[in-house]
Amino acid sequence: MSEVFEGYERQYCELSDNLTRSCTSARFFMEELKKQKLSEIKEGLDEADALIRKMDLEARSLQPSTKATLLAKLRDYKHYLNNLKTDVKRITSTDTNQAAQDELLESGINETTTVSADQKGRLLMSTERLNQSTERIKESRRTMLETEELGVSILQDLHQQRQSLLHAHSTLHAVDDNISKSKKILTTISRRINKNKLILSLIIGALILAILIILYIKLTG
């Protein structure tokens, strides 16, 4: 495993543990202290997102077997981080709803003490609709960010595939050059063998001719 990835992973695990404890304790704080704690938690979530993006980039630069394992682990980290974000949204939404209700009720009391239950219901429904619209906007923004991250990941994969294809093309070109050189060497060796055969044949012919001449001289002498 990459030492760089392990370093990011250690930072993320420590940060996620701290965020989990902070989310649990934030529920019991007073309003002002809770706002401060939630602000710190949101900063920690942004830092955790950045660490996950760094781990994702590092994992995609490794060998396929290692990359698959690390990307699977990253999916678990992302899922856990999304759960933390949901908890923070729930705490924030609860505070916002309570504050809005308190403000509306206080305003109603100041204006008149004869506000009907029907009017209170309409005010609460308006507040609920406003909160739902806010949640939909936040969800759309989160979906947009996830889509952007997916697009970046796809572009990185395509770039790596292109580099692999270029490397394979260079390798094939080198192999083709080696084959051409080998053919030339074999052709040269073949020519030398044929030349040596011819020389050997001439030497043998000359020896046979010399033997025949010697025999002829002895027989006629």
Image (cartoon, grey):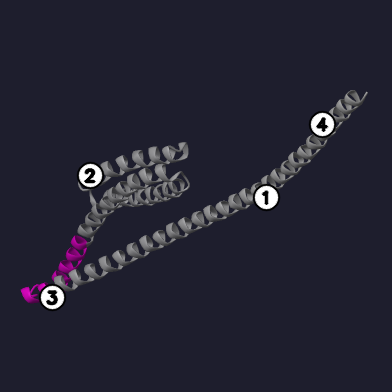
Q: Tell me, yes or no, whether the two marked residues, 3 and 4, touch with CB atoms within 8 Å.
A: no
Point out residue 86 in the picture as x, y percentages from the top left corner: 25, 55
Picture coordinates of residue 196 (x, y %)?
Answer: 78, 37
Q: Amino acid at mark 4?
A: Ile
Q: Nearer the viewer, mark 2 or mark 3?
A: 2
Helix, strand or loop status at disc 2: helix
Residue 23 vs 204, above or below: the answer is below
Determine contact: label 1, label 4, CB under 8 Å: no
- Between the residue at mark 2 and the residue at mark 4, the CA separation in whole angstroms equals 109 Å
Check disc 1: other Cα within 10 Å, few if <14, some if 14-19, many if 20+. Answer: few
- Crowding at dot 4, Cα within 10 Å, few <14 / some 14-19 / many 20+, comes out as few
- Residue at 22% of width from left, 68% of height from top? 132
Check if mark 2's residue and mark 3's residue have beta carbons within 8 Å.
no
Could you tell me residue 41's position as x and y percent? 32, 49
Comes first in the chain, label 2 or label 3: 2
Kindly identify which residue carries mark 1.
180
Q: Earlier in the sequence, mark 1 or mark 4?
A: 1
Query: Is residue 32 visible from the viewing direction of this image?
Result: no
Identify the residue under disc 4.
208
The mark found on residue 24 in the picture is: 2
Viewer-proximal residue among 36 and 42: 42
Q: Quadrant of the C terminus?
A: top right
Classified by dominant secondary structure, the portion drawn in magenta counts as helix
Identify the mark at residue 122; answer none if there is no mark: 3
Evaluate if marks 2 and 1 touch, with contact meaning CB atoms under 8 Å apart: no
Query: Which residues, given as a range, are shown in magenta?
Result: 97-121
Q: Amino acid at mark 3?
A: Arg
Residue 107 highlighted magenta (yes or no): yes
